[in-house]
Structure formats: C-alpha cells, structure tokens
Amino acid sequence: MNTVGLLLLGVAVGVGAAFSGLGGGFLMVPLLLYLGYAAQKAVGTSFLAILIISVSAIVAHGRLQNVDYRAGILLGIGGLIGAQFGARLVEQVSTDSFRKIIAVLLVLLAGYLFWKKS
C-alpha cells in the first residue's frame, strides 16, 4: 500500500479508536493482515500506530474531561506487564492461526455488543 493509502487508513482507524475506545488495534491488525503482513509484524506495527493515535485521543478526550487519569494509569501499568507476555506469546502462533483467533474474538465481541442490554 502506498503512503497516501496508509495515511488514509490511519485516519479511519484514528476515528474508530477515538470514537469507540476499543483501541484501534481491533481495526488495524485485521487490515494489516489483509494487506499481507505476518501476524507478528501486524501486531507490532499496530502498536506503534496506536501509540501515536492514543496520544492524540487522550489530548482530545482530556480537553473534554472524559478521562479518569487514576484508572487509566493503573490499567496502563497492568498493561505494561501483560504486554511483555503477549509479545512473546504471539511469536509462538502462526499467522494462519492468529487470523482465526482474531476473527473469533471479533465475532464474539460483535455478538456481545449487539445483544447486550443496556
């Protein structure tokens, strides 16, 4: 994909991430897999993009006073620890298996969100 295509993809993911709070990886990783990235490279590339998107989103949501900083920092600290395990775990999974795992997770998440009562 060319530079303009990747920038437009980033815009779409940024909107989706800032709107939904789902992080953007749920959009970015499947799209990178579709573009032919290996699972491990798709995950790593997604995290770099999401870091940049997240900084922008935290500024925007912070201005709107939509951030619980204490909860976010505590979740982030836990995430720092979990990310070390997750990065090593994805190395043990083939790209074909990873695609299936991601697909199942996205279908389950979609079903949960669709049928969940408020």
Image (tube, grey):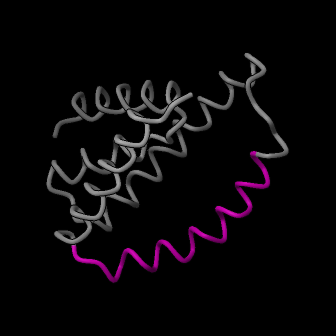
Q: With respect to residue 112, does 82 lie above or below?
A: below
Against 115, residue 38 (above or below) is below
Question: Which residue is located at x 24 percent, y 44 percent?
Answer: 31
Quadrant of res 111:
top left
Q: Is residue 88 left or right of residue 10?
A: right
Looking at the image, residue 48 sits to the left or right of residue 90; the answer is right
Identify the magenta region: 72-94
1 left or right of 93 in image: left
Q: How many marks?
A: 0
Q: What residue is at 36 percent from the left and 32 percent from the top?
A: 10
Q: Quadrant of the N terminus?
A: top left
The overriding secondary structure of the stretch rendered in magenta is helix
- Residue under the point 57% across and 74% down: 84
The image position of residue 107, as x and y in percent, is: 29, 48
Q: Is residue 73 magenta?
A: yes
- Magenta highlight on residue 17: no
Furthest residue to the top?
Answer: 64
Residue 32 x %, y %: 25, 49
